[in-house]
Amino acid sequence: MATDKQIRITAELPVDFKKVLNLYEALNWNSFDLKEEDFRKMCTQSWFVVFAWDHDELVGMGRVISDGVLTAIICGLGIAPSYQQSGIGKQLLNRLVDQCESSRLIPQLMCVESLEPYYETQGFKKFAVGMTKSVGGE
């Protein structure tokens, strides 16, 4: 597990989006079999993205999608399994929230039920029921 001193947090986009693909695969988040170019598009079209690096290894990231006026949805906040429980997720979340609040946007997020207690400790409150629809009728 890395220490916070080794981790560099930046909003600078990576040169190699294969690293984003690798992070998503390590988290088992690539069920749609997205390719490197899909991750480039996902990051460049997001309102704000932040990355955590341990030297040249991408160990975490998170994104905000937003209308830029009222609402900002925090999504894709994930930390490589071997770096979880080290405070990196909290650092990334704080950067995402700070960016939203500095633009007077209301930060919101969706998470699995098991993560609700964690996000509550970070100042989030449950406010709605989320719904999803499978692509392709699955």
Image (cartoon, rainbow, N blue to C red):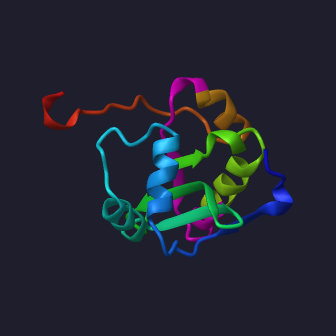
Question: Is 85 displayed left or right of 96 in the figure?
Answer: right
Q: Position of residue 66 (x, y in %)?
A: 41, 62
Q: Is residue 54 visible?
A: yes
Examine the rendering and report whether any part of residue 73 can be seen: no
- In the image, residue 125 lies in the stretch drawn in magenta: no
Residue at 72% x, 55% y is 91
Bounds of the magenta segment? 98-114
Residue 8: image quadrant is bottom right
Furthest toward the left, the residue is: 136
Residue 57 point in image, percent of width and height: 63, 60
* 119 lies above or below 73: above
Q: Where is residue 116 in the image (x, y as percent from the top left)?
A: 60, 29
Instruction: Name the quarter where the N terminus is drawn.
Output: top right
Quadrant (top left/top right/bottom left/bottom right) for the C terminus: top left
Say above or below: 48 vs 119: below
Q: Which of 136 and 47 is in front in this view?
A: 136
| Residue drawn at x 37%, y 64% as measured from the top left | 67
**Residue at the image position 40 percent from the left and 71 percent from the top:** 44
Image quadrant of residue 126? top right
